[in-house]
Image (cartoon, rainbow, N blue to C red):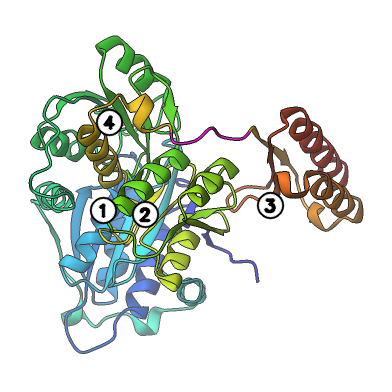
Amino acid sequence: MARRYFGTDGIRGRANAKITADLAMKVGQAAGLLFQRGDYRHRVVIGKDTRLSGYMIEYAMVAGFTSVGMDVLLLGPTPTPAVAMLTRSMRCDLGVMISASHNLYEDNGIKLFGPDGFKLSDEIEANIEALIDDDLAGRLAKSPELGRAKRIDDVAARYIEYAKRTLPRDVSFDGLRVVVDCANGAAYKVAPEALWELGAEVIKIGVEPDGLNINHEVGSTAPEALAQKVREMRADVGVALDGDADRMIIVDEKGHVVDGDQILAVVAESWQADGRLAKPGIVATVMSNLGLERRLAERGLVLERTAVGDRYVLERMVEKGFNVGGEQSGHIILTDHSTTGDGLIAAMQVLAVVHKQGRPVSEVCRRFEPLPQVLRNVRFKSGRPLEDESVLKTIAAATAKLGDHGRLVVRPSGTEPVIRVMAEADDRALVDALVDDVCAAVAKAAA
């Protein structure tokens, strides 16, 4: 059944249009009621990124949580993985991150974490949705049982120390010149500080948030600024985070982008060599390049594929016992250290391999030659074009042409009315032709 509020990564939409103060307050009330499971004082931590609308949503959620008797701990601008970590560390019943991740400032969102630091299941989100639409007037806290709110001051120091402890004590980044792009987002203080404390020479960009410039021409979705700065400063490596710092990409010393697939290969092979892989393989989505799958197979490792979305990657990792997983977009999940994607910790793992091997990033992080991969979007206004008979026939014909030499993935976006068509194979001309065929069929059905 289609859900009214939650998408693939929490609730997300235009701030003060879909994501209103009223909705934020109701989410606080609904989630607060659902996670009160005893006779003690219940607590929730709330972090946010640097969007202007974060103030409105934050205080509306404080009103919601306190009105049902939950105490609130305010973290201020904080990376998403820090919220997940502090939910566990501070023994809270619930964690909230106010962020629209890599979207521009006009959007915002609400991500919820359970007391174990993991994102909520579909079932719990459905229960929260039901409560949001319910009349909760009779379930509000009585006057003496209202919650309190306080601000936590040492969040940055706690998270930096936590991130550094994911590396052995003898690991240092001495001699590495690193450009870090914080996307004018949640990690604008903690990421440069953590890398500097580990010994790197740090050059910062995207560290001047003004409420309106998050992800604007900076960050992991706009790596051109980072690539230019790496070349200009003759740096060894560049690291770009997104607005809430749960994902990242690398730029090598030549200014070339290293995506999440290459990063997964680097971490997987490093951990395999150190005997740290819990299972002989990793988890990634259907969008990860076939070149990654072939590279891992050469080393006796499997690639488990899931639907797109870091939550589905994490669910499979927990279900099957894998400890490395992620997405091509740069969500890297290392369950030995974190319960969600963590851009800073993933970057530190890659930098540790680079420093240990003493070779250029362009060599260390180019583990395989990706197959030609084409992704196109077809926008539609209504209906279900993927159920059209002509579309199904076109997809079946394209899949047959690719055979064992490539892949075709056709899926609806989880956040907008778009059908995404992706194909990859050794033959670029074939890929282009098949994607054109499928897109044309979808567009015709959508019309």
Which of 168/136 is in front? 168
Q: Earlier in the sequence, mark 4 or mark 2?
A: 4
Q: Earlier in the sequence, mark 3 or mark 1?
A: 1
Q: Which residues are magenta?
A: 367-371
Question: Callout 4: few (<14), some (14-19), or many (20+) C-alpha neighbours within 10 Å?
Answer: some
Q: Is residue 44 left or right of residue 30?
A: left
**Disc 4 marks which amino acid?**
Pro
Residue 105 image point, x, y percent: 41, 36
Which of 348/404 is in front? 404
Farthest top residue?
A: 232
- Marks 4 and 2, Cα distance to the nearest angstrom? 26 Å
Q: Earlier in the sequence, mark 3 or mark 2?
A: 2
Residue at image point 20% right, 61% down: 86
Q: Earlier in the sequence, mark 4 or mark 1?
A: 4
- Marks 1 and 2, Cα distance to the nearest angstrom? 18 Å
- Where does label 2 land, which residue? 333
- Marks 3 and 4, Cα distance to the nearest angstrom? 35 Å
What numbered label is drawn on residue 411? 3
- Residue 206 visible in rendering: yes
Where, quadrant-wise, is the N terminus in this rendering?
bottom right
Where, quadrant-wise, is the C terminus in this rendering?
top right
- Where does label 4 land, which residue? 209
Residue at image point 24% right, 48% down: 78
Front label number (3 vs 2): 2
**Disc 1 marks which amino acid?**
Asp
